Image (cartoon, rainbow, N blue to C red):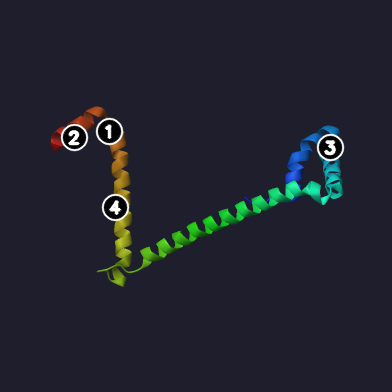
Amino acid sequence: KRVKTAFQFYQSDQLARLRQEFPDMSSAMSELSRRWKTLSSTQKKTYDELEQADRRRFKEETLNADAEKFAQVQSQRESMKVQEGEKKSSRSAREKMNRQREEKTKRRIQREAELTDEQIAERNRIRE
């Protein structure tokens, strides 16, 4: 979410009132802009403070998002490195095996979800 400017905070604060005075949006926005330009710096101070707070929020969110992305990239890089006891040429074979395991697990879970209670009880009896 982007940073809101002081004017945008003023707009969200005042627009509902102006919409009652001015029926169409363009005249309400024109009047809002005119009133903003006539405000003194002390009257704008509240909105400027809100903007500064929103800038701090945005900076913090951006830093957190960047840190998460960096960690994700680092994790991907680590997983791509040749692991101990592994040859560089066997890398794709390991990935293929992992994919096959995942697919097998998904199929097993799907089959088990389709079993009836009697079939589950029979399977458990056979396993014992």
Q: Nearer the viewer, mark 3 or mark 4?
A: 3
Q: Residue flagged by tag 2: what amino acid is it? A: Arg
Upstream in the sequence, badge 1 or badge 4?
4
Dot 4 lies on which element? Answer: helix
Task: Say if 117 sits above or below 24 in the image.
Answer: above
User: Could you tell me how far apart the alpha carbons at marks 2 and 1 are, in whole angstroms?
Assistant: 10 Å
Bin the neighbour count of mark 1 within 10 Å (Cα to Cα): few under 14, some 14-19, many 20 and up.
Answer: few
Q: In this rendered view, identify the residue nearer to me: 10 or 112.
A: 10
Q: Nearer the viewer, residue 32 or 96?
A: 32
Asked if labels 1 and 2 touch by Cβ distance under 8 angstroms, the answer is yes
Q: Measure the alpha-carbon separation of dots 3 and 2.
A: 71 Å
Q: CA distance from mark 2 to mark 4?
A: 22 Å
Q: Which mark is residue 24?
A: 3
Q: Quadrant of residue 114?
A: top left
Whether tag 3 and tag 1 are in contact, CB under 8 A, the answer is no
Distance from Cα at disc 3 to Cα at disc 4:
62 Å
- The residue where tag 4 is placed is 101
Which picture quadrant has residue 75? bottom left
Regarding mark 3 in the picture, which secondary structure is present there? loop
**Distance in Å between CA atoms under marks 3 and 1:** 62 Å
Task: Give the mark toward the camera: 3 or 1.
Answer: 3
Q: Position of residue 50 (x, y in %)?
A: 69, 48
Q: Which residue is mark 2?
A: 123
In the picture shown, does residue 85 fall above or below 19? Answer: below
The quadrant of the picture occupied by the C terminus is: top left
Q: Give the Cα distance between marks 1 and 4.
A: 21 Å
The type of residue carrying mark 3 is Asp
